[in-house]
Amino acid sequence: MEKFNFDVLTPLLDQQVAVFAPDSDTKLTDLTITQVSRGAPHGDEFDAFSVEFKGDKNQHCPQGNYLLKHPGFGEMTLFMSPHAIDSYQVCISRRKND
């Protein structure tokens, strides 16, 4: 998950990410990165951030795990939640390595 981080994702604003069913070659849709924000727990001990996406309202993805692909970070299976018919969020909070 090293390449899916705040510093890599921030320059990818307004770029599309391909969304696939997990463990499948079935592409579901493309989502556009609209925001990358630091989370409240971010600090010395934790790396925390969220990524907001916008998509086509006719290709809704329910809450669940998805394989996200982009040349900037490669391929990552992550839990994604919708917060509107066409808006999604991935939240990351992980302990930093010492």
Image (cartoon, grey):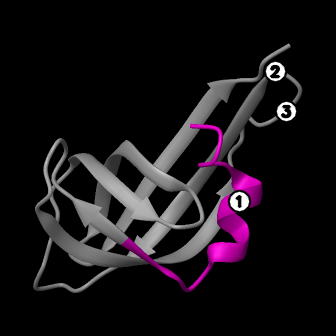
Q: In this figure, which residue is indicated by the disc labeled 1?
A: 8
Q: Residue at x 14, y 72 (%)?
A: 60
Q: Does the magenta-highlighted stretch encompass residue 2?
A: yes
Q: Amino acid at mark 1?
A: Val
Of helix, strand and loop, which one carries label 1? helix
Of helix, strand and loop, which one carries label 2? loop
Q: Position of residue 45 (x, y in %)?
A: 81, 21
Left or right placement of residue 95 versus residue 1 in this view = right
Q: Amino acid at mark 3?
A: Gly
Q: Along the polypeptide, which appears first: circle 1 or circle 3?
A: 1
Relative to the observer, which residue lies in front, 89 or 72? Answer: 72
Q: Position of residue 75 (x, y in %)?
A: 42, 51
Q: Which mark is residue 45?
A: 2
- The image quarter containing residue 97 is top right
- Badge 3: how crowded within 10 Å, few (<14), some, or many (20+)? few
Q: In this figure, which residue is indicated by the disc labeled 3?
A: 43
What whole-number distance in Å separates the C-alpha atoms at marks 3 and 2? 6 Å
Q: Amino acid at mark 2?
A: Glu
Residue 64 in the image: above or below residue 53: above
Q: Position of residue 6 (x, y in %)?
A: 71, 54
Q: Along the polypeptide, which appears first: circle 1 or circle 2?
A: 1
Residue 47 in the image: above or below residue 66: above
Check whether the beta carbons of the residues at disc 3 and disc 2 lie within 8 A of each other: yes
Left or right placement of residue 43 versus residue 83 in this view = right
Q: Residue at x 14, y 57 (%)?
A: 25
Q: Which residues are magenta?
A: 1-17
Q: Nearer the viewer, mark 1 or mark 2?
A: 1
